[in-house]
Image (cartoon, grey):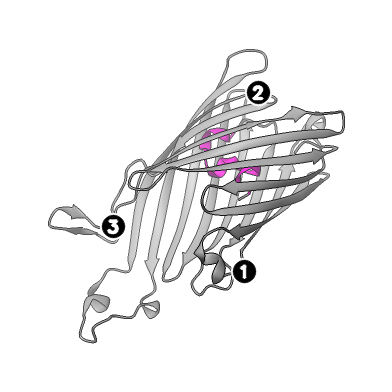
């Protein structure tokens, strides 16, 4: 829900777009109170390298019921100057997924079903992510696609059919900062998400920022959830919290979702010391 503060998680082309090294930690608990509900943790770092390059990486852990996903990504980005204030960046990233299924969570409908004892419960798959982004001081628009190779996991093939294949995703993200006054900024943003076989999804977010230090916002995820956003900057540290209210039937079984993030800006130039 707070990807707008660390959009490197969505698009590796973000690496190198800021004049500082960014280190961020995100922790999310979704559908709290529901057994086996998703829990996710991310840690990322990205930085400018010279005048035209950027590098970065992240590690993540995700658990949903019996399924655990862990992975690492390393990326390289190149930035082209289109004008004095506008740039276009391109990036490629290599990723490695580790997949696990905990059989203790599974129950067969038939007592003599030997599927649980013979199924593969561990898998490893490499992958490639691609991203590009246009940006200036107020606007950024990014397009990215992870899991380009669409590899199989758990050796999932039967009669020539891929049973456990990673799907290619497409993300389109945009954000613009309106300077309403000397002390107040309004920052709308949106994210479109598409994967074959599922309806297109989109988020719309808006937040108000006071004195470049405090923000309050709301996010709407189409046919899914509404999230409230709150946070602040203190020197080179940023903190944010989001609460998700589900708009589906899951709301009858859970008490919403909680997400926090911490971000540290290192080797930052003084002119950006208080930026969001």
Q: Secondary structure at mark 2?
A: loop
The residue singled out by tag 2 in the image is: 136
Is 208 placed above or below 165 here?
above
Q: Position of residue 206 (x, y in %)?
A: 68, 40
Q: Which residues make up the magenta segment?
A: 2-15
Which of the 4 image quadrants contains residue 168?
top left
Q: Position of residue 241 (x, y in %)?
A: 71, 55
Disc nearer the start of the sequence (1/2): 2
Q: Position of residue 237 (x, y in %)?
A: 77, 48
Quadrant position of the C terminus in the picture: top right
The residue singled out by tag 3 in the image is: 164
Work out whether residue 239 can be spotted: no
Nearer the camera: disc 1 or disc 2: 1
Label ID, residue 160: none
Q: Position of residue 242 (x, y in %)?
A: 67, 55
- Horizontally, residue 104 falls left or right of residue 229, namely left
Q: CA distance from mark 1 to mark 2?
A: 39 Å
Q: Principal SS element in the magenta part? A: helix
Nearer the camera: disc 1 or disc 3: 1
- Horizontally, residue 147 falls left or right of residue 161, namely right
- Horizontally, residue 159 falls left or right of residue 91, namely left
Q: Residue at x 55, y 22 (%)?
A: 88
Q: Residue at x 57, y 41 (%)?
A: 8
Label ID, residue 255: 1
């Amino acid at each position: 829900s707070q990807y707008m503060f660390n959009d490197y998680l969505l698009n590796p082309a973000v690496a190198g777009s800021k004049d500082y090294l960014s280190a961020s930690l995100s922790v999310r608990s979704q559908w709290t109170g529901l057994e086996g509900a998703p829990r996710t943790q991310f840690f990322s770092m990205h930085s400018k390298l010279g005048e035209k390059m950027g590098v970065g990486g992240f590690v993540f852990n995700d658990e949903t019921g019996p399924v655990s996903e862990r992975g690492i990504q390393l990326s390289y980005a190149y930035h082209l100057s289109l004008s004095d204030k506008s740039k276009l960046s391109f990036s490629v990233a290599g990723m490695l997924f580790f997949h696990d299924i905990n059989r203790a969570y599974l129950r067969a409908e038939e007592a003599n079903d030997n599927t649980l004892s013979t199924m593969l419960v561990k898998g490893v798959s490499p992958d490639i992510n691609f991203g590009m982004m246009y940006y200036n001081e107020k606007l950024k628009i990014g397009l990215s696609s992870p899991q380009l190779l669409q590899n199989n996991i758990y050796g999932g093939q039967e009669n020539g059919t891929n049973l456990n294949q990673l799907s290619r995703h497409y993300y389109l993200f945009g954000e613009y900062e309106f300077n309403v006054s000397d002390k107040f900024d309004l920052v709308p943003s949106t994210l479109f998400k598409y994967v074959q076989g599922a309806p297109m999804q989109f988020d719309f977010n808006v937040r108000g920022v006071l004195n470049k230090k405090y923000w309050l916002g709301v996010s709407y995820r189409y046919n899914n959830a509404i999230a409230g956003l709150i946070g602040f900057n203190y020197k080179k540290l940023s903190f944010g919290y989001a609460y998700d209210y589900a708009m589906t039937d899951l709301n009858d079984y859970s008490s919403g979702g909680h997400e926090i993030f911490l971000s540290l800006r290192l080797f930052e130039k003084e002119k950006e010391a208080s930026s969001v």
